[in-house]
Image: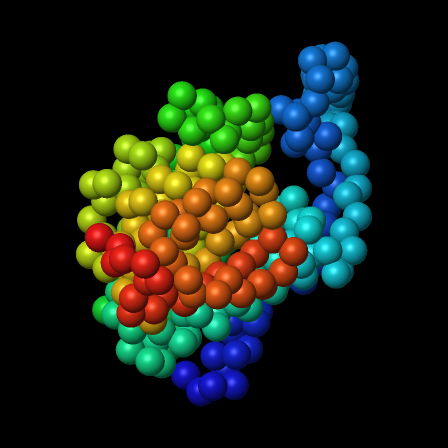
Amino acid sequence: MTDDIKSLYLGLLKKSLTFNIWPEPLVPVSFFNSGRSWLIRCLFATATKLLGPWGLVLARQYGHHSVDLAEGKSFALFADTMVGLKRLDNLQTCLETVLREGIPGEMIETGVWRGGACIFMRGVLAAHGVTDRKVFVADSFEGLPKPDVDLFPEDKGDRHSRWRFLAVSLEEVKNNFLRYGLLDDQVVFVKGFFHDSLPHAPIGSLSVLRLDGDMYGSTMDVLENLYKKLNPGGFCIIDDYALPGCRKAVNDFREKHGICEPMIEIDWTGCYWRKGEAVCKGQLT
């Protein structure tokens, strides 16, 4: 595949995953019901019941500014990823850098929603003809966990577990890979909440570690289990650094382990750093 065709394919893949090619259809108002009050949910449920026999559904048009879509401040509700184009561009740069420089290790995203960013990872490997690396897709496939305030008091009051639209089944994610022609034995699914699944995941070493866990506990679980597997020269990408829980977990982990590589901003919430050979004070074990 020539460089021009690679660029065209990966550009089209990014636009498809973010639903940037088509105008978005009307969205059922029930999509965000889990975040609404009991009264509003009841009203929508009644309206849905009354309209159902007529083959109708209560829906509305969601408008998105192109700048917000690029920044990932909003996302098309029919998209396969909430990650904006800037964060996908960053992911492509990180992936192609480790491939070009021969940094060993697999790729993983922890917290995948509909699988879009992992689908893009697999697409990058396909575009470059890489057959000896795997993409690990780690998620509960049941939504986010309820806050464990005894273990992680920083998550007190976190409401992510109530947002049911964040719960996307393993079967649906696999089908999304299949729709893009990218479901094969180079894609490995790791199912379960991170504190249960990651300690036993069959991951040798990593070259790209991408975190999208939103909460303090989920973020810390990933860093404690996987950062030591990230090879020097590899990239650690944080999707939710604007969220207080995630931000504190990242900062606490970096301080605890003396990680001094500079954090580089991607957009309003994404950032990353490249792992060096050593840390500022002591070596991570």
Q: Could you tell me which residue is drawn at 55 percent across and 49 percent down?
A: 241
How many numbered discs, if any?
0
Image point (34%, 76%), residue name: 99
Residue at 79% x, 36% y is 60
Q: Residue 180, image x and y in percent?
A: 46, 59
Residue 31 visible to an observer of this rendering: yes
Q: Nearer the viewer, residue 213 or 284?
A: 284
Task: Tell me where residue 38 sits by quadrant.
Answer: top right
Q: In the shown orientation, is residue 79 left or right of residue 126?
A: right
* Residue 179 image offset from top left, x and y in percent: 46, 54
Q: Above or below — where is 105 with respect to 155?
A: below
Q: Is residue 123 left or right of residue 36?
A: left
Image quadrant for the N terminus?
bottom left
Looking at the image, residue 72 lies above or below residue 86: above
Residue 169 on image: x %, y %: 43, 35
Q: Residue at x 58, y 42 (%)?
A: 243
Q: Extreme front residue here? A: 281
Say if residue 232 shows up in the picture: no
Residue 50 at x, y percent in the picture:
75, 15
